């Protein structure tokens, strides 16, 4: 199907290959994930930790669907820059200010690609003495050779394409698209 005028206006005229997950499909799955997470955490302090920047839209939609008390904080880790290939190097640029010890930590990630970002973060977070540590990923490519912790909550199995939109970028562009599309 040809891209609509509104889509082309939002991308500055750049044509994306195809829409992989429509906004309505994402919204429905996020509602379900909210229900799953609500049911999974009966007691104790829950800290939802969003991995920036990619998770910012997913996290903001998700926490509004979780019907129990929680706190929100963020982590910033950079793994790859302007390239469409993951380099595997992870740098921690921002550490959460909130105390993690004794809390249920739910690490929210937009996409698990090679899994290198998560493996490094899981190692770091476990050292802070959380009561529990789980991962919620909107997208999972299932190509990681080794995952230190498998995601407890997954939105969608993702194709091995370069995906943009709903927080995911290419060279910092396309994060604001309400849907998820493949770039190539
Ligand atoms: C991307 C993406 C994930 C990570 C997944 O983040 O948002 O966090 O890479 O890749 P991996 O499983 O191969 O480690 P990026 O470092 O591009 O930063 P961003 O979240 O700011 O876009």
Image (cartoon, rainbow, N blue to C red):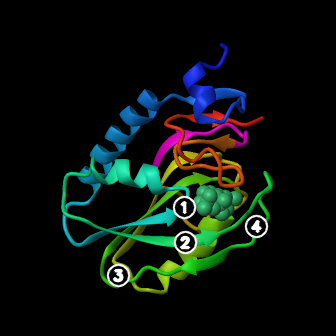
- Looking at the image, can residue 152 be seen? no
Disc 2 versus disc 1: distance between alpha carbons?
A: 7 Å
Of the image marks 3 and 4, the number of the one nearer the N terminus: 4
From the image, tell me which residue sits under label 3.
98
Q: Position of residue 110 (x, y in %)?
A: 54, 52
**Which residue lies under the disc numbered 1?**
53
Name the quadrant of the C terminus.
Answer: top right
Q: Nearer the viewer, mark 1 or mark 4?
A: 1
Q: Is residue 52 visible?
A: yes
Q: Are marks 2 and 1 in contact (CB under 8 Å)?
A: yes
- Of residue 183 and residue 9, the one placed in the foreground of this image is 9
Q: Is mark 4 within 8 Å of ligand 1?
A: yes
The answer to whether the residue labelled 2 contacts the one labelled 4, judged by CB atoms less than 8 Å apart, is: no
Q: Residue at x 49, y 86 (%)?
A: 127
Residue at numbered disc 2? 76
Q: Earlier in the sequence, mark 3 or mark 1?
A: 1
For residue 3, which quarter of the picture? top right
- Under circle 1, the secondary element is loop
Queried on whether the Cβ of the residue with tag 2 lies below 8 angstroms from ligand 1, the answer reads: yes
Q: CA distance from mark 3 to mark 4?
A: 27 Å
- SS for callout 2: strand
In this view of the protein, which residue sits in the foreground, 66 or 61?
61
Q: Which stretch appears magenta? A: 153-162
Residue behind label 3 places its C-beta within 8 angstroms of ligand 1: no
Which numbered tag is attached to residue 88?
4
Name the residue located 19 percent from the left edge and 67 percent from the top edge: 43
Instruction: For the N terminus, give its image quadrant.
Output: top right
The reply to whether the residue tagged 1 has its Cβ within 8 angstroms of ligand 1 is yes
Marks 3 and 1, how far apart in space?
18 Å
């Amino acid at each position: 199907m040809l891209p609509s005028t509104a889509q082309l206006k939002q991308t500055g005229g750049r044509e994306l290959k195809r829409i992989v997950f429509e906004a309505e499909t994402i919204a429905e799955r996020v509602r379900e994930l909210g229900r799953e997470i609500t049911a999974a955490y009966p007691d104790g302090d829950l800290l939802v930790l969003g991995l920036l920047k990619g998770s910012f839209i997913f996290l903001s939609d998700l926490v509004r669907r979780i019907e129990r008390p929680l706190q929100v904080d963020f982590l910033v880790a950079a793994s790859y820059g302007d390239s469409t290939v993951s380099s595997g190097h992870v740098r921690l640029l921002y550490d959460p200010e909130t105390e993690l010890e004794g809390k249920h930590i739910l690490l929210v990630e937009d996409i698990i690609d090679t899994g290198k970002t998560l493996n490094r973060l899981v190692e770091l977070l476990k050292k802070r003495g959380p009561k529990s540590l789980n991962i919620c990923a909107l997208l999972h490519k299932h190509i990681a050779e080794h995952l230190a912790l498998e995601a407890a909550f997954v939105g969608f199995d993702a194709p091995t394409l370069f995906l943009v939109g709903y927080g995911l970028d290419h060279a910092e562009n396309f994060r604001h698209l309400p849907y998820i599309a493949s770039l190539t």
